[in-house]
Image (tube, grey):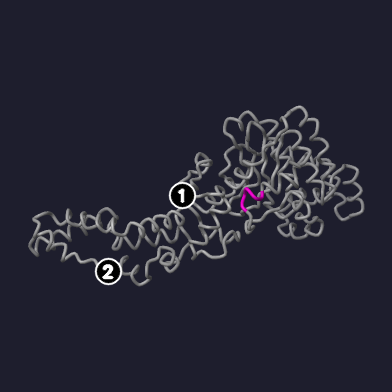
Amino acid sequence: MSENNNIKFVNDLLQSALSKAGNVSNPLRTTFEQKLLDAGLSINQAAVNLKIDNKQLDKILDGKLSQFDIISLEKIADFLEIPTAQIAEMYFYLLRQSHEPELRDAKRRSYILNTFDLSILKKIKFIDSISDLEKIEARLLHFFNLKNIQDYKNEAVSVAYSSGARKSKSGFSRSLWFRTAQESFEGLENPYTYDREKLFEYIPYIRWYSQDTKNGLFQVVRSLFKLGVTVIYVPSIREAHVRGATFAVNGKPAIAITDYTDFYPTIWFVLLHELFHVLFDWEEILINTFHVSGDDEFYSQNESAANDFARKYFASDEDLAVFSENIRNIAFITEFAAQNNVHPSFYHVFYAYENSKTEPSIWGRIRKHMPDINEALTPLIKVEWDTPNSLSEITKIRKKKVYNL
């Protein structure tokens, strides 16, 4: 191939690339930098994780990598009397063959970067660094009991969360929370039969247990288990906007609750909200295998009925009116709550919710009336994201200490 033809060939390639990229001056760098933005990574972090020298990566992105000897390829192509594109294809095939272990490693690393939002994992303290992919992979494999990182495919949430390439931080966070909850149920085989009528009969008594801020929730969870309803705690992820979820596990209800706020009453609110879905949406849950409750536009199903039920279960409109009139009389509120078999903190939370728009500081003011939510959750085996245990290890502990299995 002559020098003029060579120049024309390269120019044609460049023009084609520019055309496909919408006439972006450097489509490779632009695409790469957008990827960094989506993944929440710096170019230095990407270079470290992909095992590419930082300076070399810059040269590649700018098309200035001197080691790629296209002139030599041109000479070989001329000698063999074949098109340059063909010799380039043959050359890259040889490169792939000779660097197969390195490319396989690169594919694994890219899978981790594309599947997991490392910035979110670090934020929730699941990992302590986003620059050591070997350590991150080991952590994920252990936690989810995986043999291969590519077994984490989000298949269980593909319909709800559009599995595959991460669309958003909230999408990844939901997927992580959902998968953790779902896999936590796999080893919990509830031996009791689910009986809807008995659940109906038991629900009126749940409110009474809210007064016991240390063991009340634990006792309710144990009682529900014997009614065929399994309840576990999964730590919250703020970006997920998830309050709780109800699953169909072996044909029985399984509820995951989370402390999406730090207020004691909300964990009970979530439980009653999900029990409403068990009672009135169970057939639909059986078909879809799950129902997720949250607080943003993602959740298309109407949650107002379940919210209304949970709120009025703990505090009727009349009760809140009495509370409003006597809000500064703590002794009266304490006695009034005891008469209604509910912890007084519920009135403070529901009142704050209804008045937070006109009194933005109200949430801070009611904290002094809130019991420590950790005391209620600890008996349920309150596991945080930085736990050293795997999900299967956590399940074994719960089976013994919570459900007496």
Q: Which residues are magenta?
A: 390-394
Q: Residue 55, located in which quarter of the rendered image?
A: bottom left
Please, what is the three-letter code of the amino acid marked with disc 2? Leu
Please provide percent x and percent y for residue 260. 67, 51
Please provide percent x and percent y for residue 331. 92, 53
In magenta stretch: residue 391: yes
Q: Is residue 244 above or below residue 279?
A: below
Q: Is residue 41 left or right of residue 335?
A: left
Who's the residue at 56% across and 51% down the image? 173
Residue 154 visible in this rendered orientation of the protein: yes
- Asked whether 245 or 248 is in front, the reply is 248
Residue 357 visible in this rendered orientation of the protein: no
Please provide percent x and percent y for residue 236. 64, 52
Q: Is residue 133 left or right of residue 62?
A: right
Label disc, if present, on residue 65 of the rendered structure: 2
In magenta stretch: residue 1: no
The kind of secondary structure element at disc 2 is loop
Quadrant assignment for the N terminus: bottom left
- Asked whether 209 or 386 is in front, the reply is 386
| Residue at mark 2 to residue at mark 1: CA–CA distance | 31 Å
User: Looking at the magenta stretch, what is its main secondary structure?
Assistant: helix
- Asked whether 67 or 305 is in front, the reply is 67
Looking at the image, is mark 2 or mark 1 earlier in the sequence? 2
Could you classify mark 1 by the number of other residues whose Cα lies within 10 Å: few (under 14), some (14-19), or many (20 or more)?
A: few
Residue picked out by circle 1 = 150
